[in-house]
Image: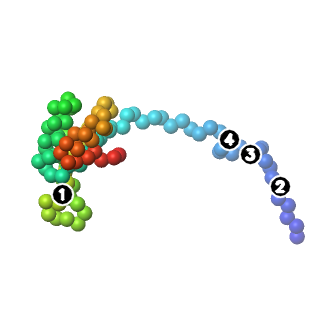
């Protein structure tokens, strides 16, 4: 018994023949900068300094970040979370501020 394969070609529309549907763009994404500091005192000072230096409308949030597997508070880093909805803060300036207190700006 013989079989023949017949190709119909372009007479059948394929999904790839039409342009992709338009997807509405999202609004601006809220930008957060995270500064990593060695202890709570440094984090509190950086948070206050960020408000003073950059004219932030609200004080940044402080978050304790325990190192993996460590229960001792001495082994915790502190994060300063700076909200930047207008994307007006300069990453280099934030990194310089954190470096003054032996910290750094976490890369996104």
Q: Residues within 10 Å of mark 4 (few under 14, many from 20)?
A: few
Of callouts 1 and 4, which one flags the residue occurring earlier in the amino acid sequence? 4
Is residue 89 shown above or below 73? above
Query: In front: mark 1 or mark 3?
Result: 1
Place residue 51 in its image quadrant. Answer: top left
Of callouts 1 and 3, which one flags the residue occurring earlier in the amino acid sequence? 3
Q: Residues within 10 Å of mark 1 (few under 14, many from 20)?
A: some
Q: Which residue is mark 2?
A: 6
Which numbered tag is attached to residue 76?
Answer: 1
Query: In front: mark 4 or mark 3?
Result: 4
Of callouts 4 and 3, which one flags the residue occurring earlier in the amino acid sequence? 3
Quarter placement of the N terminus: bottom right
What residue do we see at 23% from left, 44% from top?
99
Q: Say whether marks 1 and 4 touch (CB < 8 Å).
A: no
What residue do we see at 20% from left, 58% from top?
66
Is residue 33 rendered to the left or right of residue 13?
left
Query: In front: mark 1 or mark 2?
Result: 1
Q: Which residue is mark 4?
A: 17
Distance from label 1 to label 3 (Cα)? 63 Å
Q: Residues within 10 Å of mark 2 (few under 14, many from 20)?
A: few
Camera-nearest residue between 76 and 98: 98
Of callouts 4 and 2, which one flags the residue occurring earlier in the amino acid sequence? 2
Q: Which residue is mark 3?
A: 12
Which numbered tag is attached to residue 27?
Answer: none
Secondary structure of the residue carrying tag 3 is loop
Query: In front: mark 1 or mark 4?
Result: 1
Q: Position of residue 26 (x, y in %)?
A: 42, 36
What residue do we see at 79% from left, 47% from top?
9
Distance from label 4 to label 3 (Cα)? 10 Å
């Amino acid at each position: 018994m013989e079989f023949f394969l017949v190709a119909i070609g372009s007479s059948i529309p394929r999904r790839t023949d039409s342009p992709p549907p338009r997807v509405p763009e999202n609004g601006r994404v809220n930008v957060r900068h995270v500064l990593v500091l060695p202890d709570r005192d440094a984090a509190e000072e950086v948070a206050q300094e960020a408000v003073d230096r950059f004219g932030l409308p609200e004080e940044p949030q402080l978050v304790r970040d325990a190192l993996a597997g460590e229960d001792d508070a001495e082994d915790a880093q502190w994060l300063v979370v700076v909200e930047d909805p207008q994307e007006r803060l300069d990453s280099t300036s934030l990194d310089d501020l954190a470096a003054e207190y032996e910290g750094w700006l976490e890369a996104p």
